[in-house]
Image (spheres, helix red, strand yellow):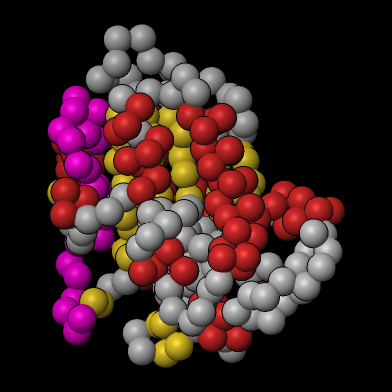
Amino acid sequence: MSAPLSVSSGLKGPDDAAIAALAAAAVERLRPGVASPYLLIAEHAGNLVPQPWHDLGLAPPFLDTHFAVDLGIDALTRRLSQTLRAPAVIAHYSRLFLDYNRPAGEWDYMRPDLGGIPVPGNLAVDAADRRLRDLIAWAPLEQAITEEAVGRQALVSVHSFTPVMGGQWRGVEIGVLWREPSPFVTAVLETLGTLGAAAGLRIGDNEPYDWRQAVGYTLNRHGLERGRDCLYLEVRNDLLSNPEKFERVSQTLENVFAAVARSPWPDPTVIA
């Protein structure tokens, strides 16, 4: 595999060892195999682009924006994994390189622009380039989620969203996105509604996005299609950049998921 490849970015094809190293760097597992009803998933936690793709031709500041990464989610997922003693799968590569939470045929699986600003490395992704990205970014995350989801009662995919979208302020601060109702979803909504209100947080039920009207590849694939309870958790990212607000959000979510672990299932793993 060391021969040059005809890919959109003009990169040379990595050899097997390089591909293995890049794939190993794609994902991190926290507390693998630990007993917990939950698996936390952070598909959009990272903003890295593998070196052969040269940041997809973008200036570095673009990789620090919401286009490239869910701001604050790496820290939040690590905190929840630690305090809930739950396993987590954290992606390191930017969703601009490959967005695992989108089906391969979707426009933003490897999106070609950022609100009108071209992403040079994504403008003409050919078959060879796509195969490499799948090997390096999709396959390791797929394997980690598949393995860590075994025996879990619920999957929680952790995301953040921008305070303003399309010129409109979003008043919701934490959103719970669900596609199919379940005792788990009901318990999270009710408990978060109570504890969130006590913490002065505004909670959204399928807000700011409605999963019933949108694509949620990760939890469709690993949750609903396999009969597992699941939801997307969305936190407004301005709360995660402020240490005091980050602490308030983290403590609230910890209390919610610890309480819920004891409610909808007949024999849940105890979380102290």
Magenta stretch: includes residue 186: yes
* Above-or-below relation of 13 to 119: above
Q: Which percent across, then down, holds residue 94?
A: 54, 66
Q: Which residue of the protein is positioned furthest toward the top in this rendering?
A: 267
Task: Please tell me which residue lies in front, 13 or 259.
Answer: 13
Is 25 on the left-hand or right-hand side of 164? right
* Above-or-below relation of 257 to 232: above
Is 245 on the left-hand or right-hand side of 212? right
Is 87 on the left-hand or right-hand side of 115? right
**Magenta-highlighted residues:** 166-188
Residue in the picture at 43% in, 64% down: 109
**Residue 21 found in image quarter:** bottom right
**Residue 241 found in image quarter:** bottom left
Task: Please tell me which residue lies in front, 261 or 144.
Answer: 144
Is there any visible trace of residue 65 in the rendered image? yes
Residue in the picture at 58% in, 24% down: 34
Q: Which percent across, then down, holds residue 183?
A: 19, 25
Q: Which percent across, then down, holds residue 103?
A: 38, 54
* Above-or-below relation of 124 to 43: below
Magenta stretch: includes residue 62: no
